[in-house]
Amino acid sequence: MPNKTKRIVILTDVELRKTLSRLTSEIIEKVKNLENLLLVGIPTRGIDLAEVLEKELFCKTGLKIRKGIIDPTFYRDDQNRVGTRLIKATDIPTPIEKKEILLIDDVIYTGRTIRAAMDALYSWGRPQRVMLLVMVDRGHRELPIQPDFCGKKVPTSKNESISLRLNNIDNEEGVFLE
């Protein structure tokens, strides 16, 4: 049965790699002490994006940046609307006091996932600073949350979705509007 979903390429694999390189350079420019940085991926694709950024940062600086995972599921105020998925274990590998945290997610939409992730993060302590990196900002914010680092802004309708595809998981790479 053919797939009836129309798929539009937002970023090709080459454009995605260039965008990741640009975002990495912006992180290096904005964070003065990279040894104090902790990359924190938000499930599901934010975790994979954090791994890609960790490798990019290592290639550009030679520094191994620590990374962790924060699952905001139980901190959401809209669980009945979004439903639940398989919970990913939160893994914060270091005390976050005085750390600069870079929350990483693939797409920002209403801002509710990020708010929940910040609530979850603060249950682990009080970092020096929290920043946000997203691959795509699709608009429709319900909360006043904006990314510090953004790969691309893509205005969408509420019935469209955006997916980040990565080779190590999907056997293709790019960003797509469906």
Image: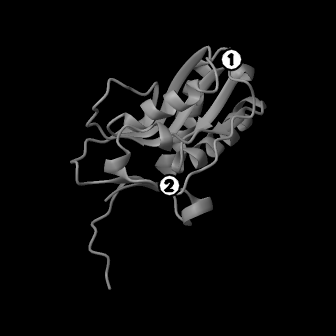
Q: Is residue 6 visible?
A: yes
Name the residue rendered at 46%, 24% in the picture: 148
State the SS at label 1: loop
| Residue at 43%, 30% in the rendered image | 115
Q: Amino acid at mark 2?
A: Asp
Q: Nearer the viewer, residue 147 or 87?
A: 87
Q: Using a 10 Å C-alpha cutoff, classify the residue at mark 1 as few (fewer than 14 neighbours), some (14 to 19) or many (20 or more).
A: some
The correct choice, above or below, for 171 with respect to 45 in the image is below
Q: Is 50 drawn above or below residue 148 in the view shown?
A: below
Q: Amino acid at mark 1?
A: Glu
Residue 66 in the image: x percent, y percent? 73, 33
Is residue 150 in sight in this rendering?
no
Determine the secondary structure under disc 2. Answer: helix
Above or below — where is 12 with respect to 111? below
- Going 64% across and 42% down the picture, which residue do you hit? 90
Classify mark 2: residues with Cα within 10 Å, few (<14), some (14-19) or many (20+).
Answer: some
Q: Which mark is residue 97?
A: 1
Report the disc number at residue 13: 2
Q: Position of residue 72 (x, y in %)?
A: 51, 39
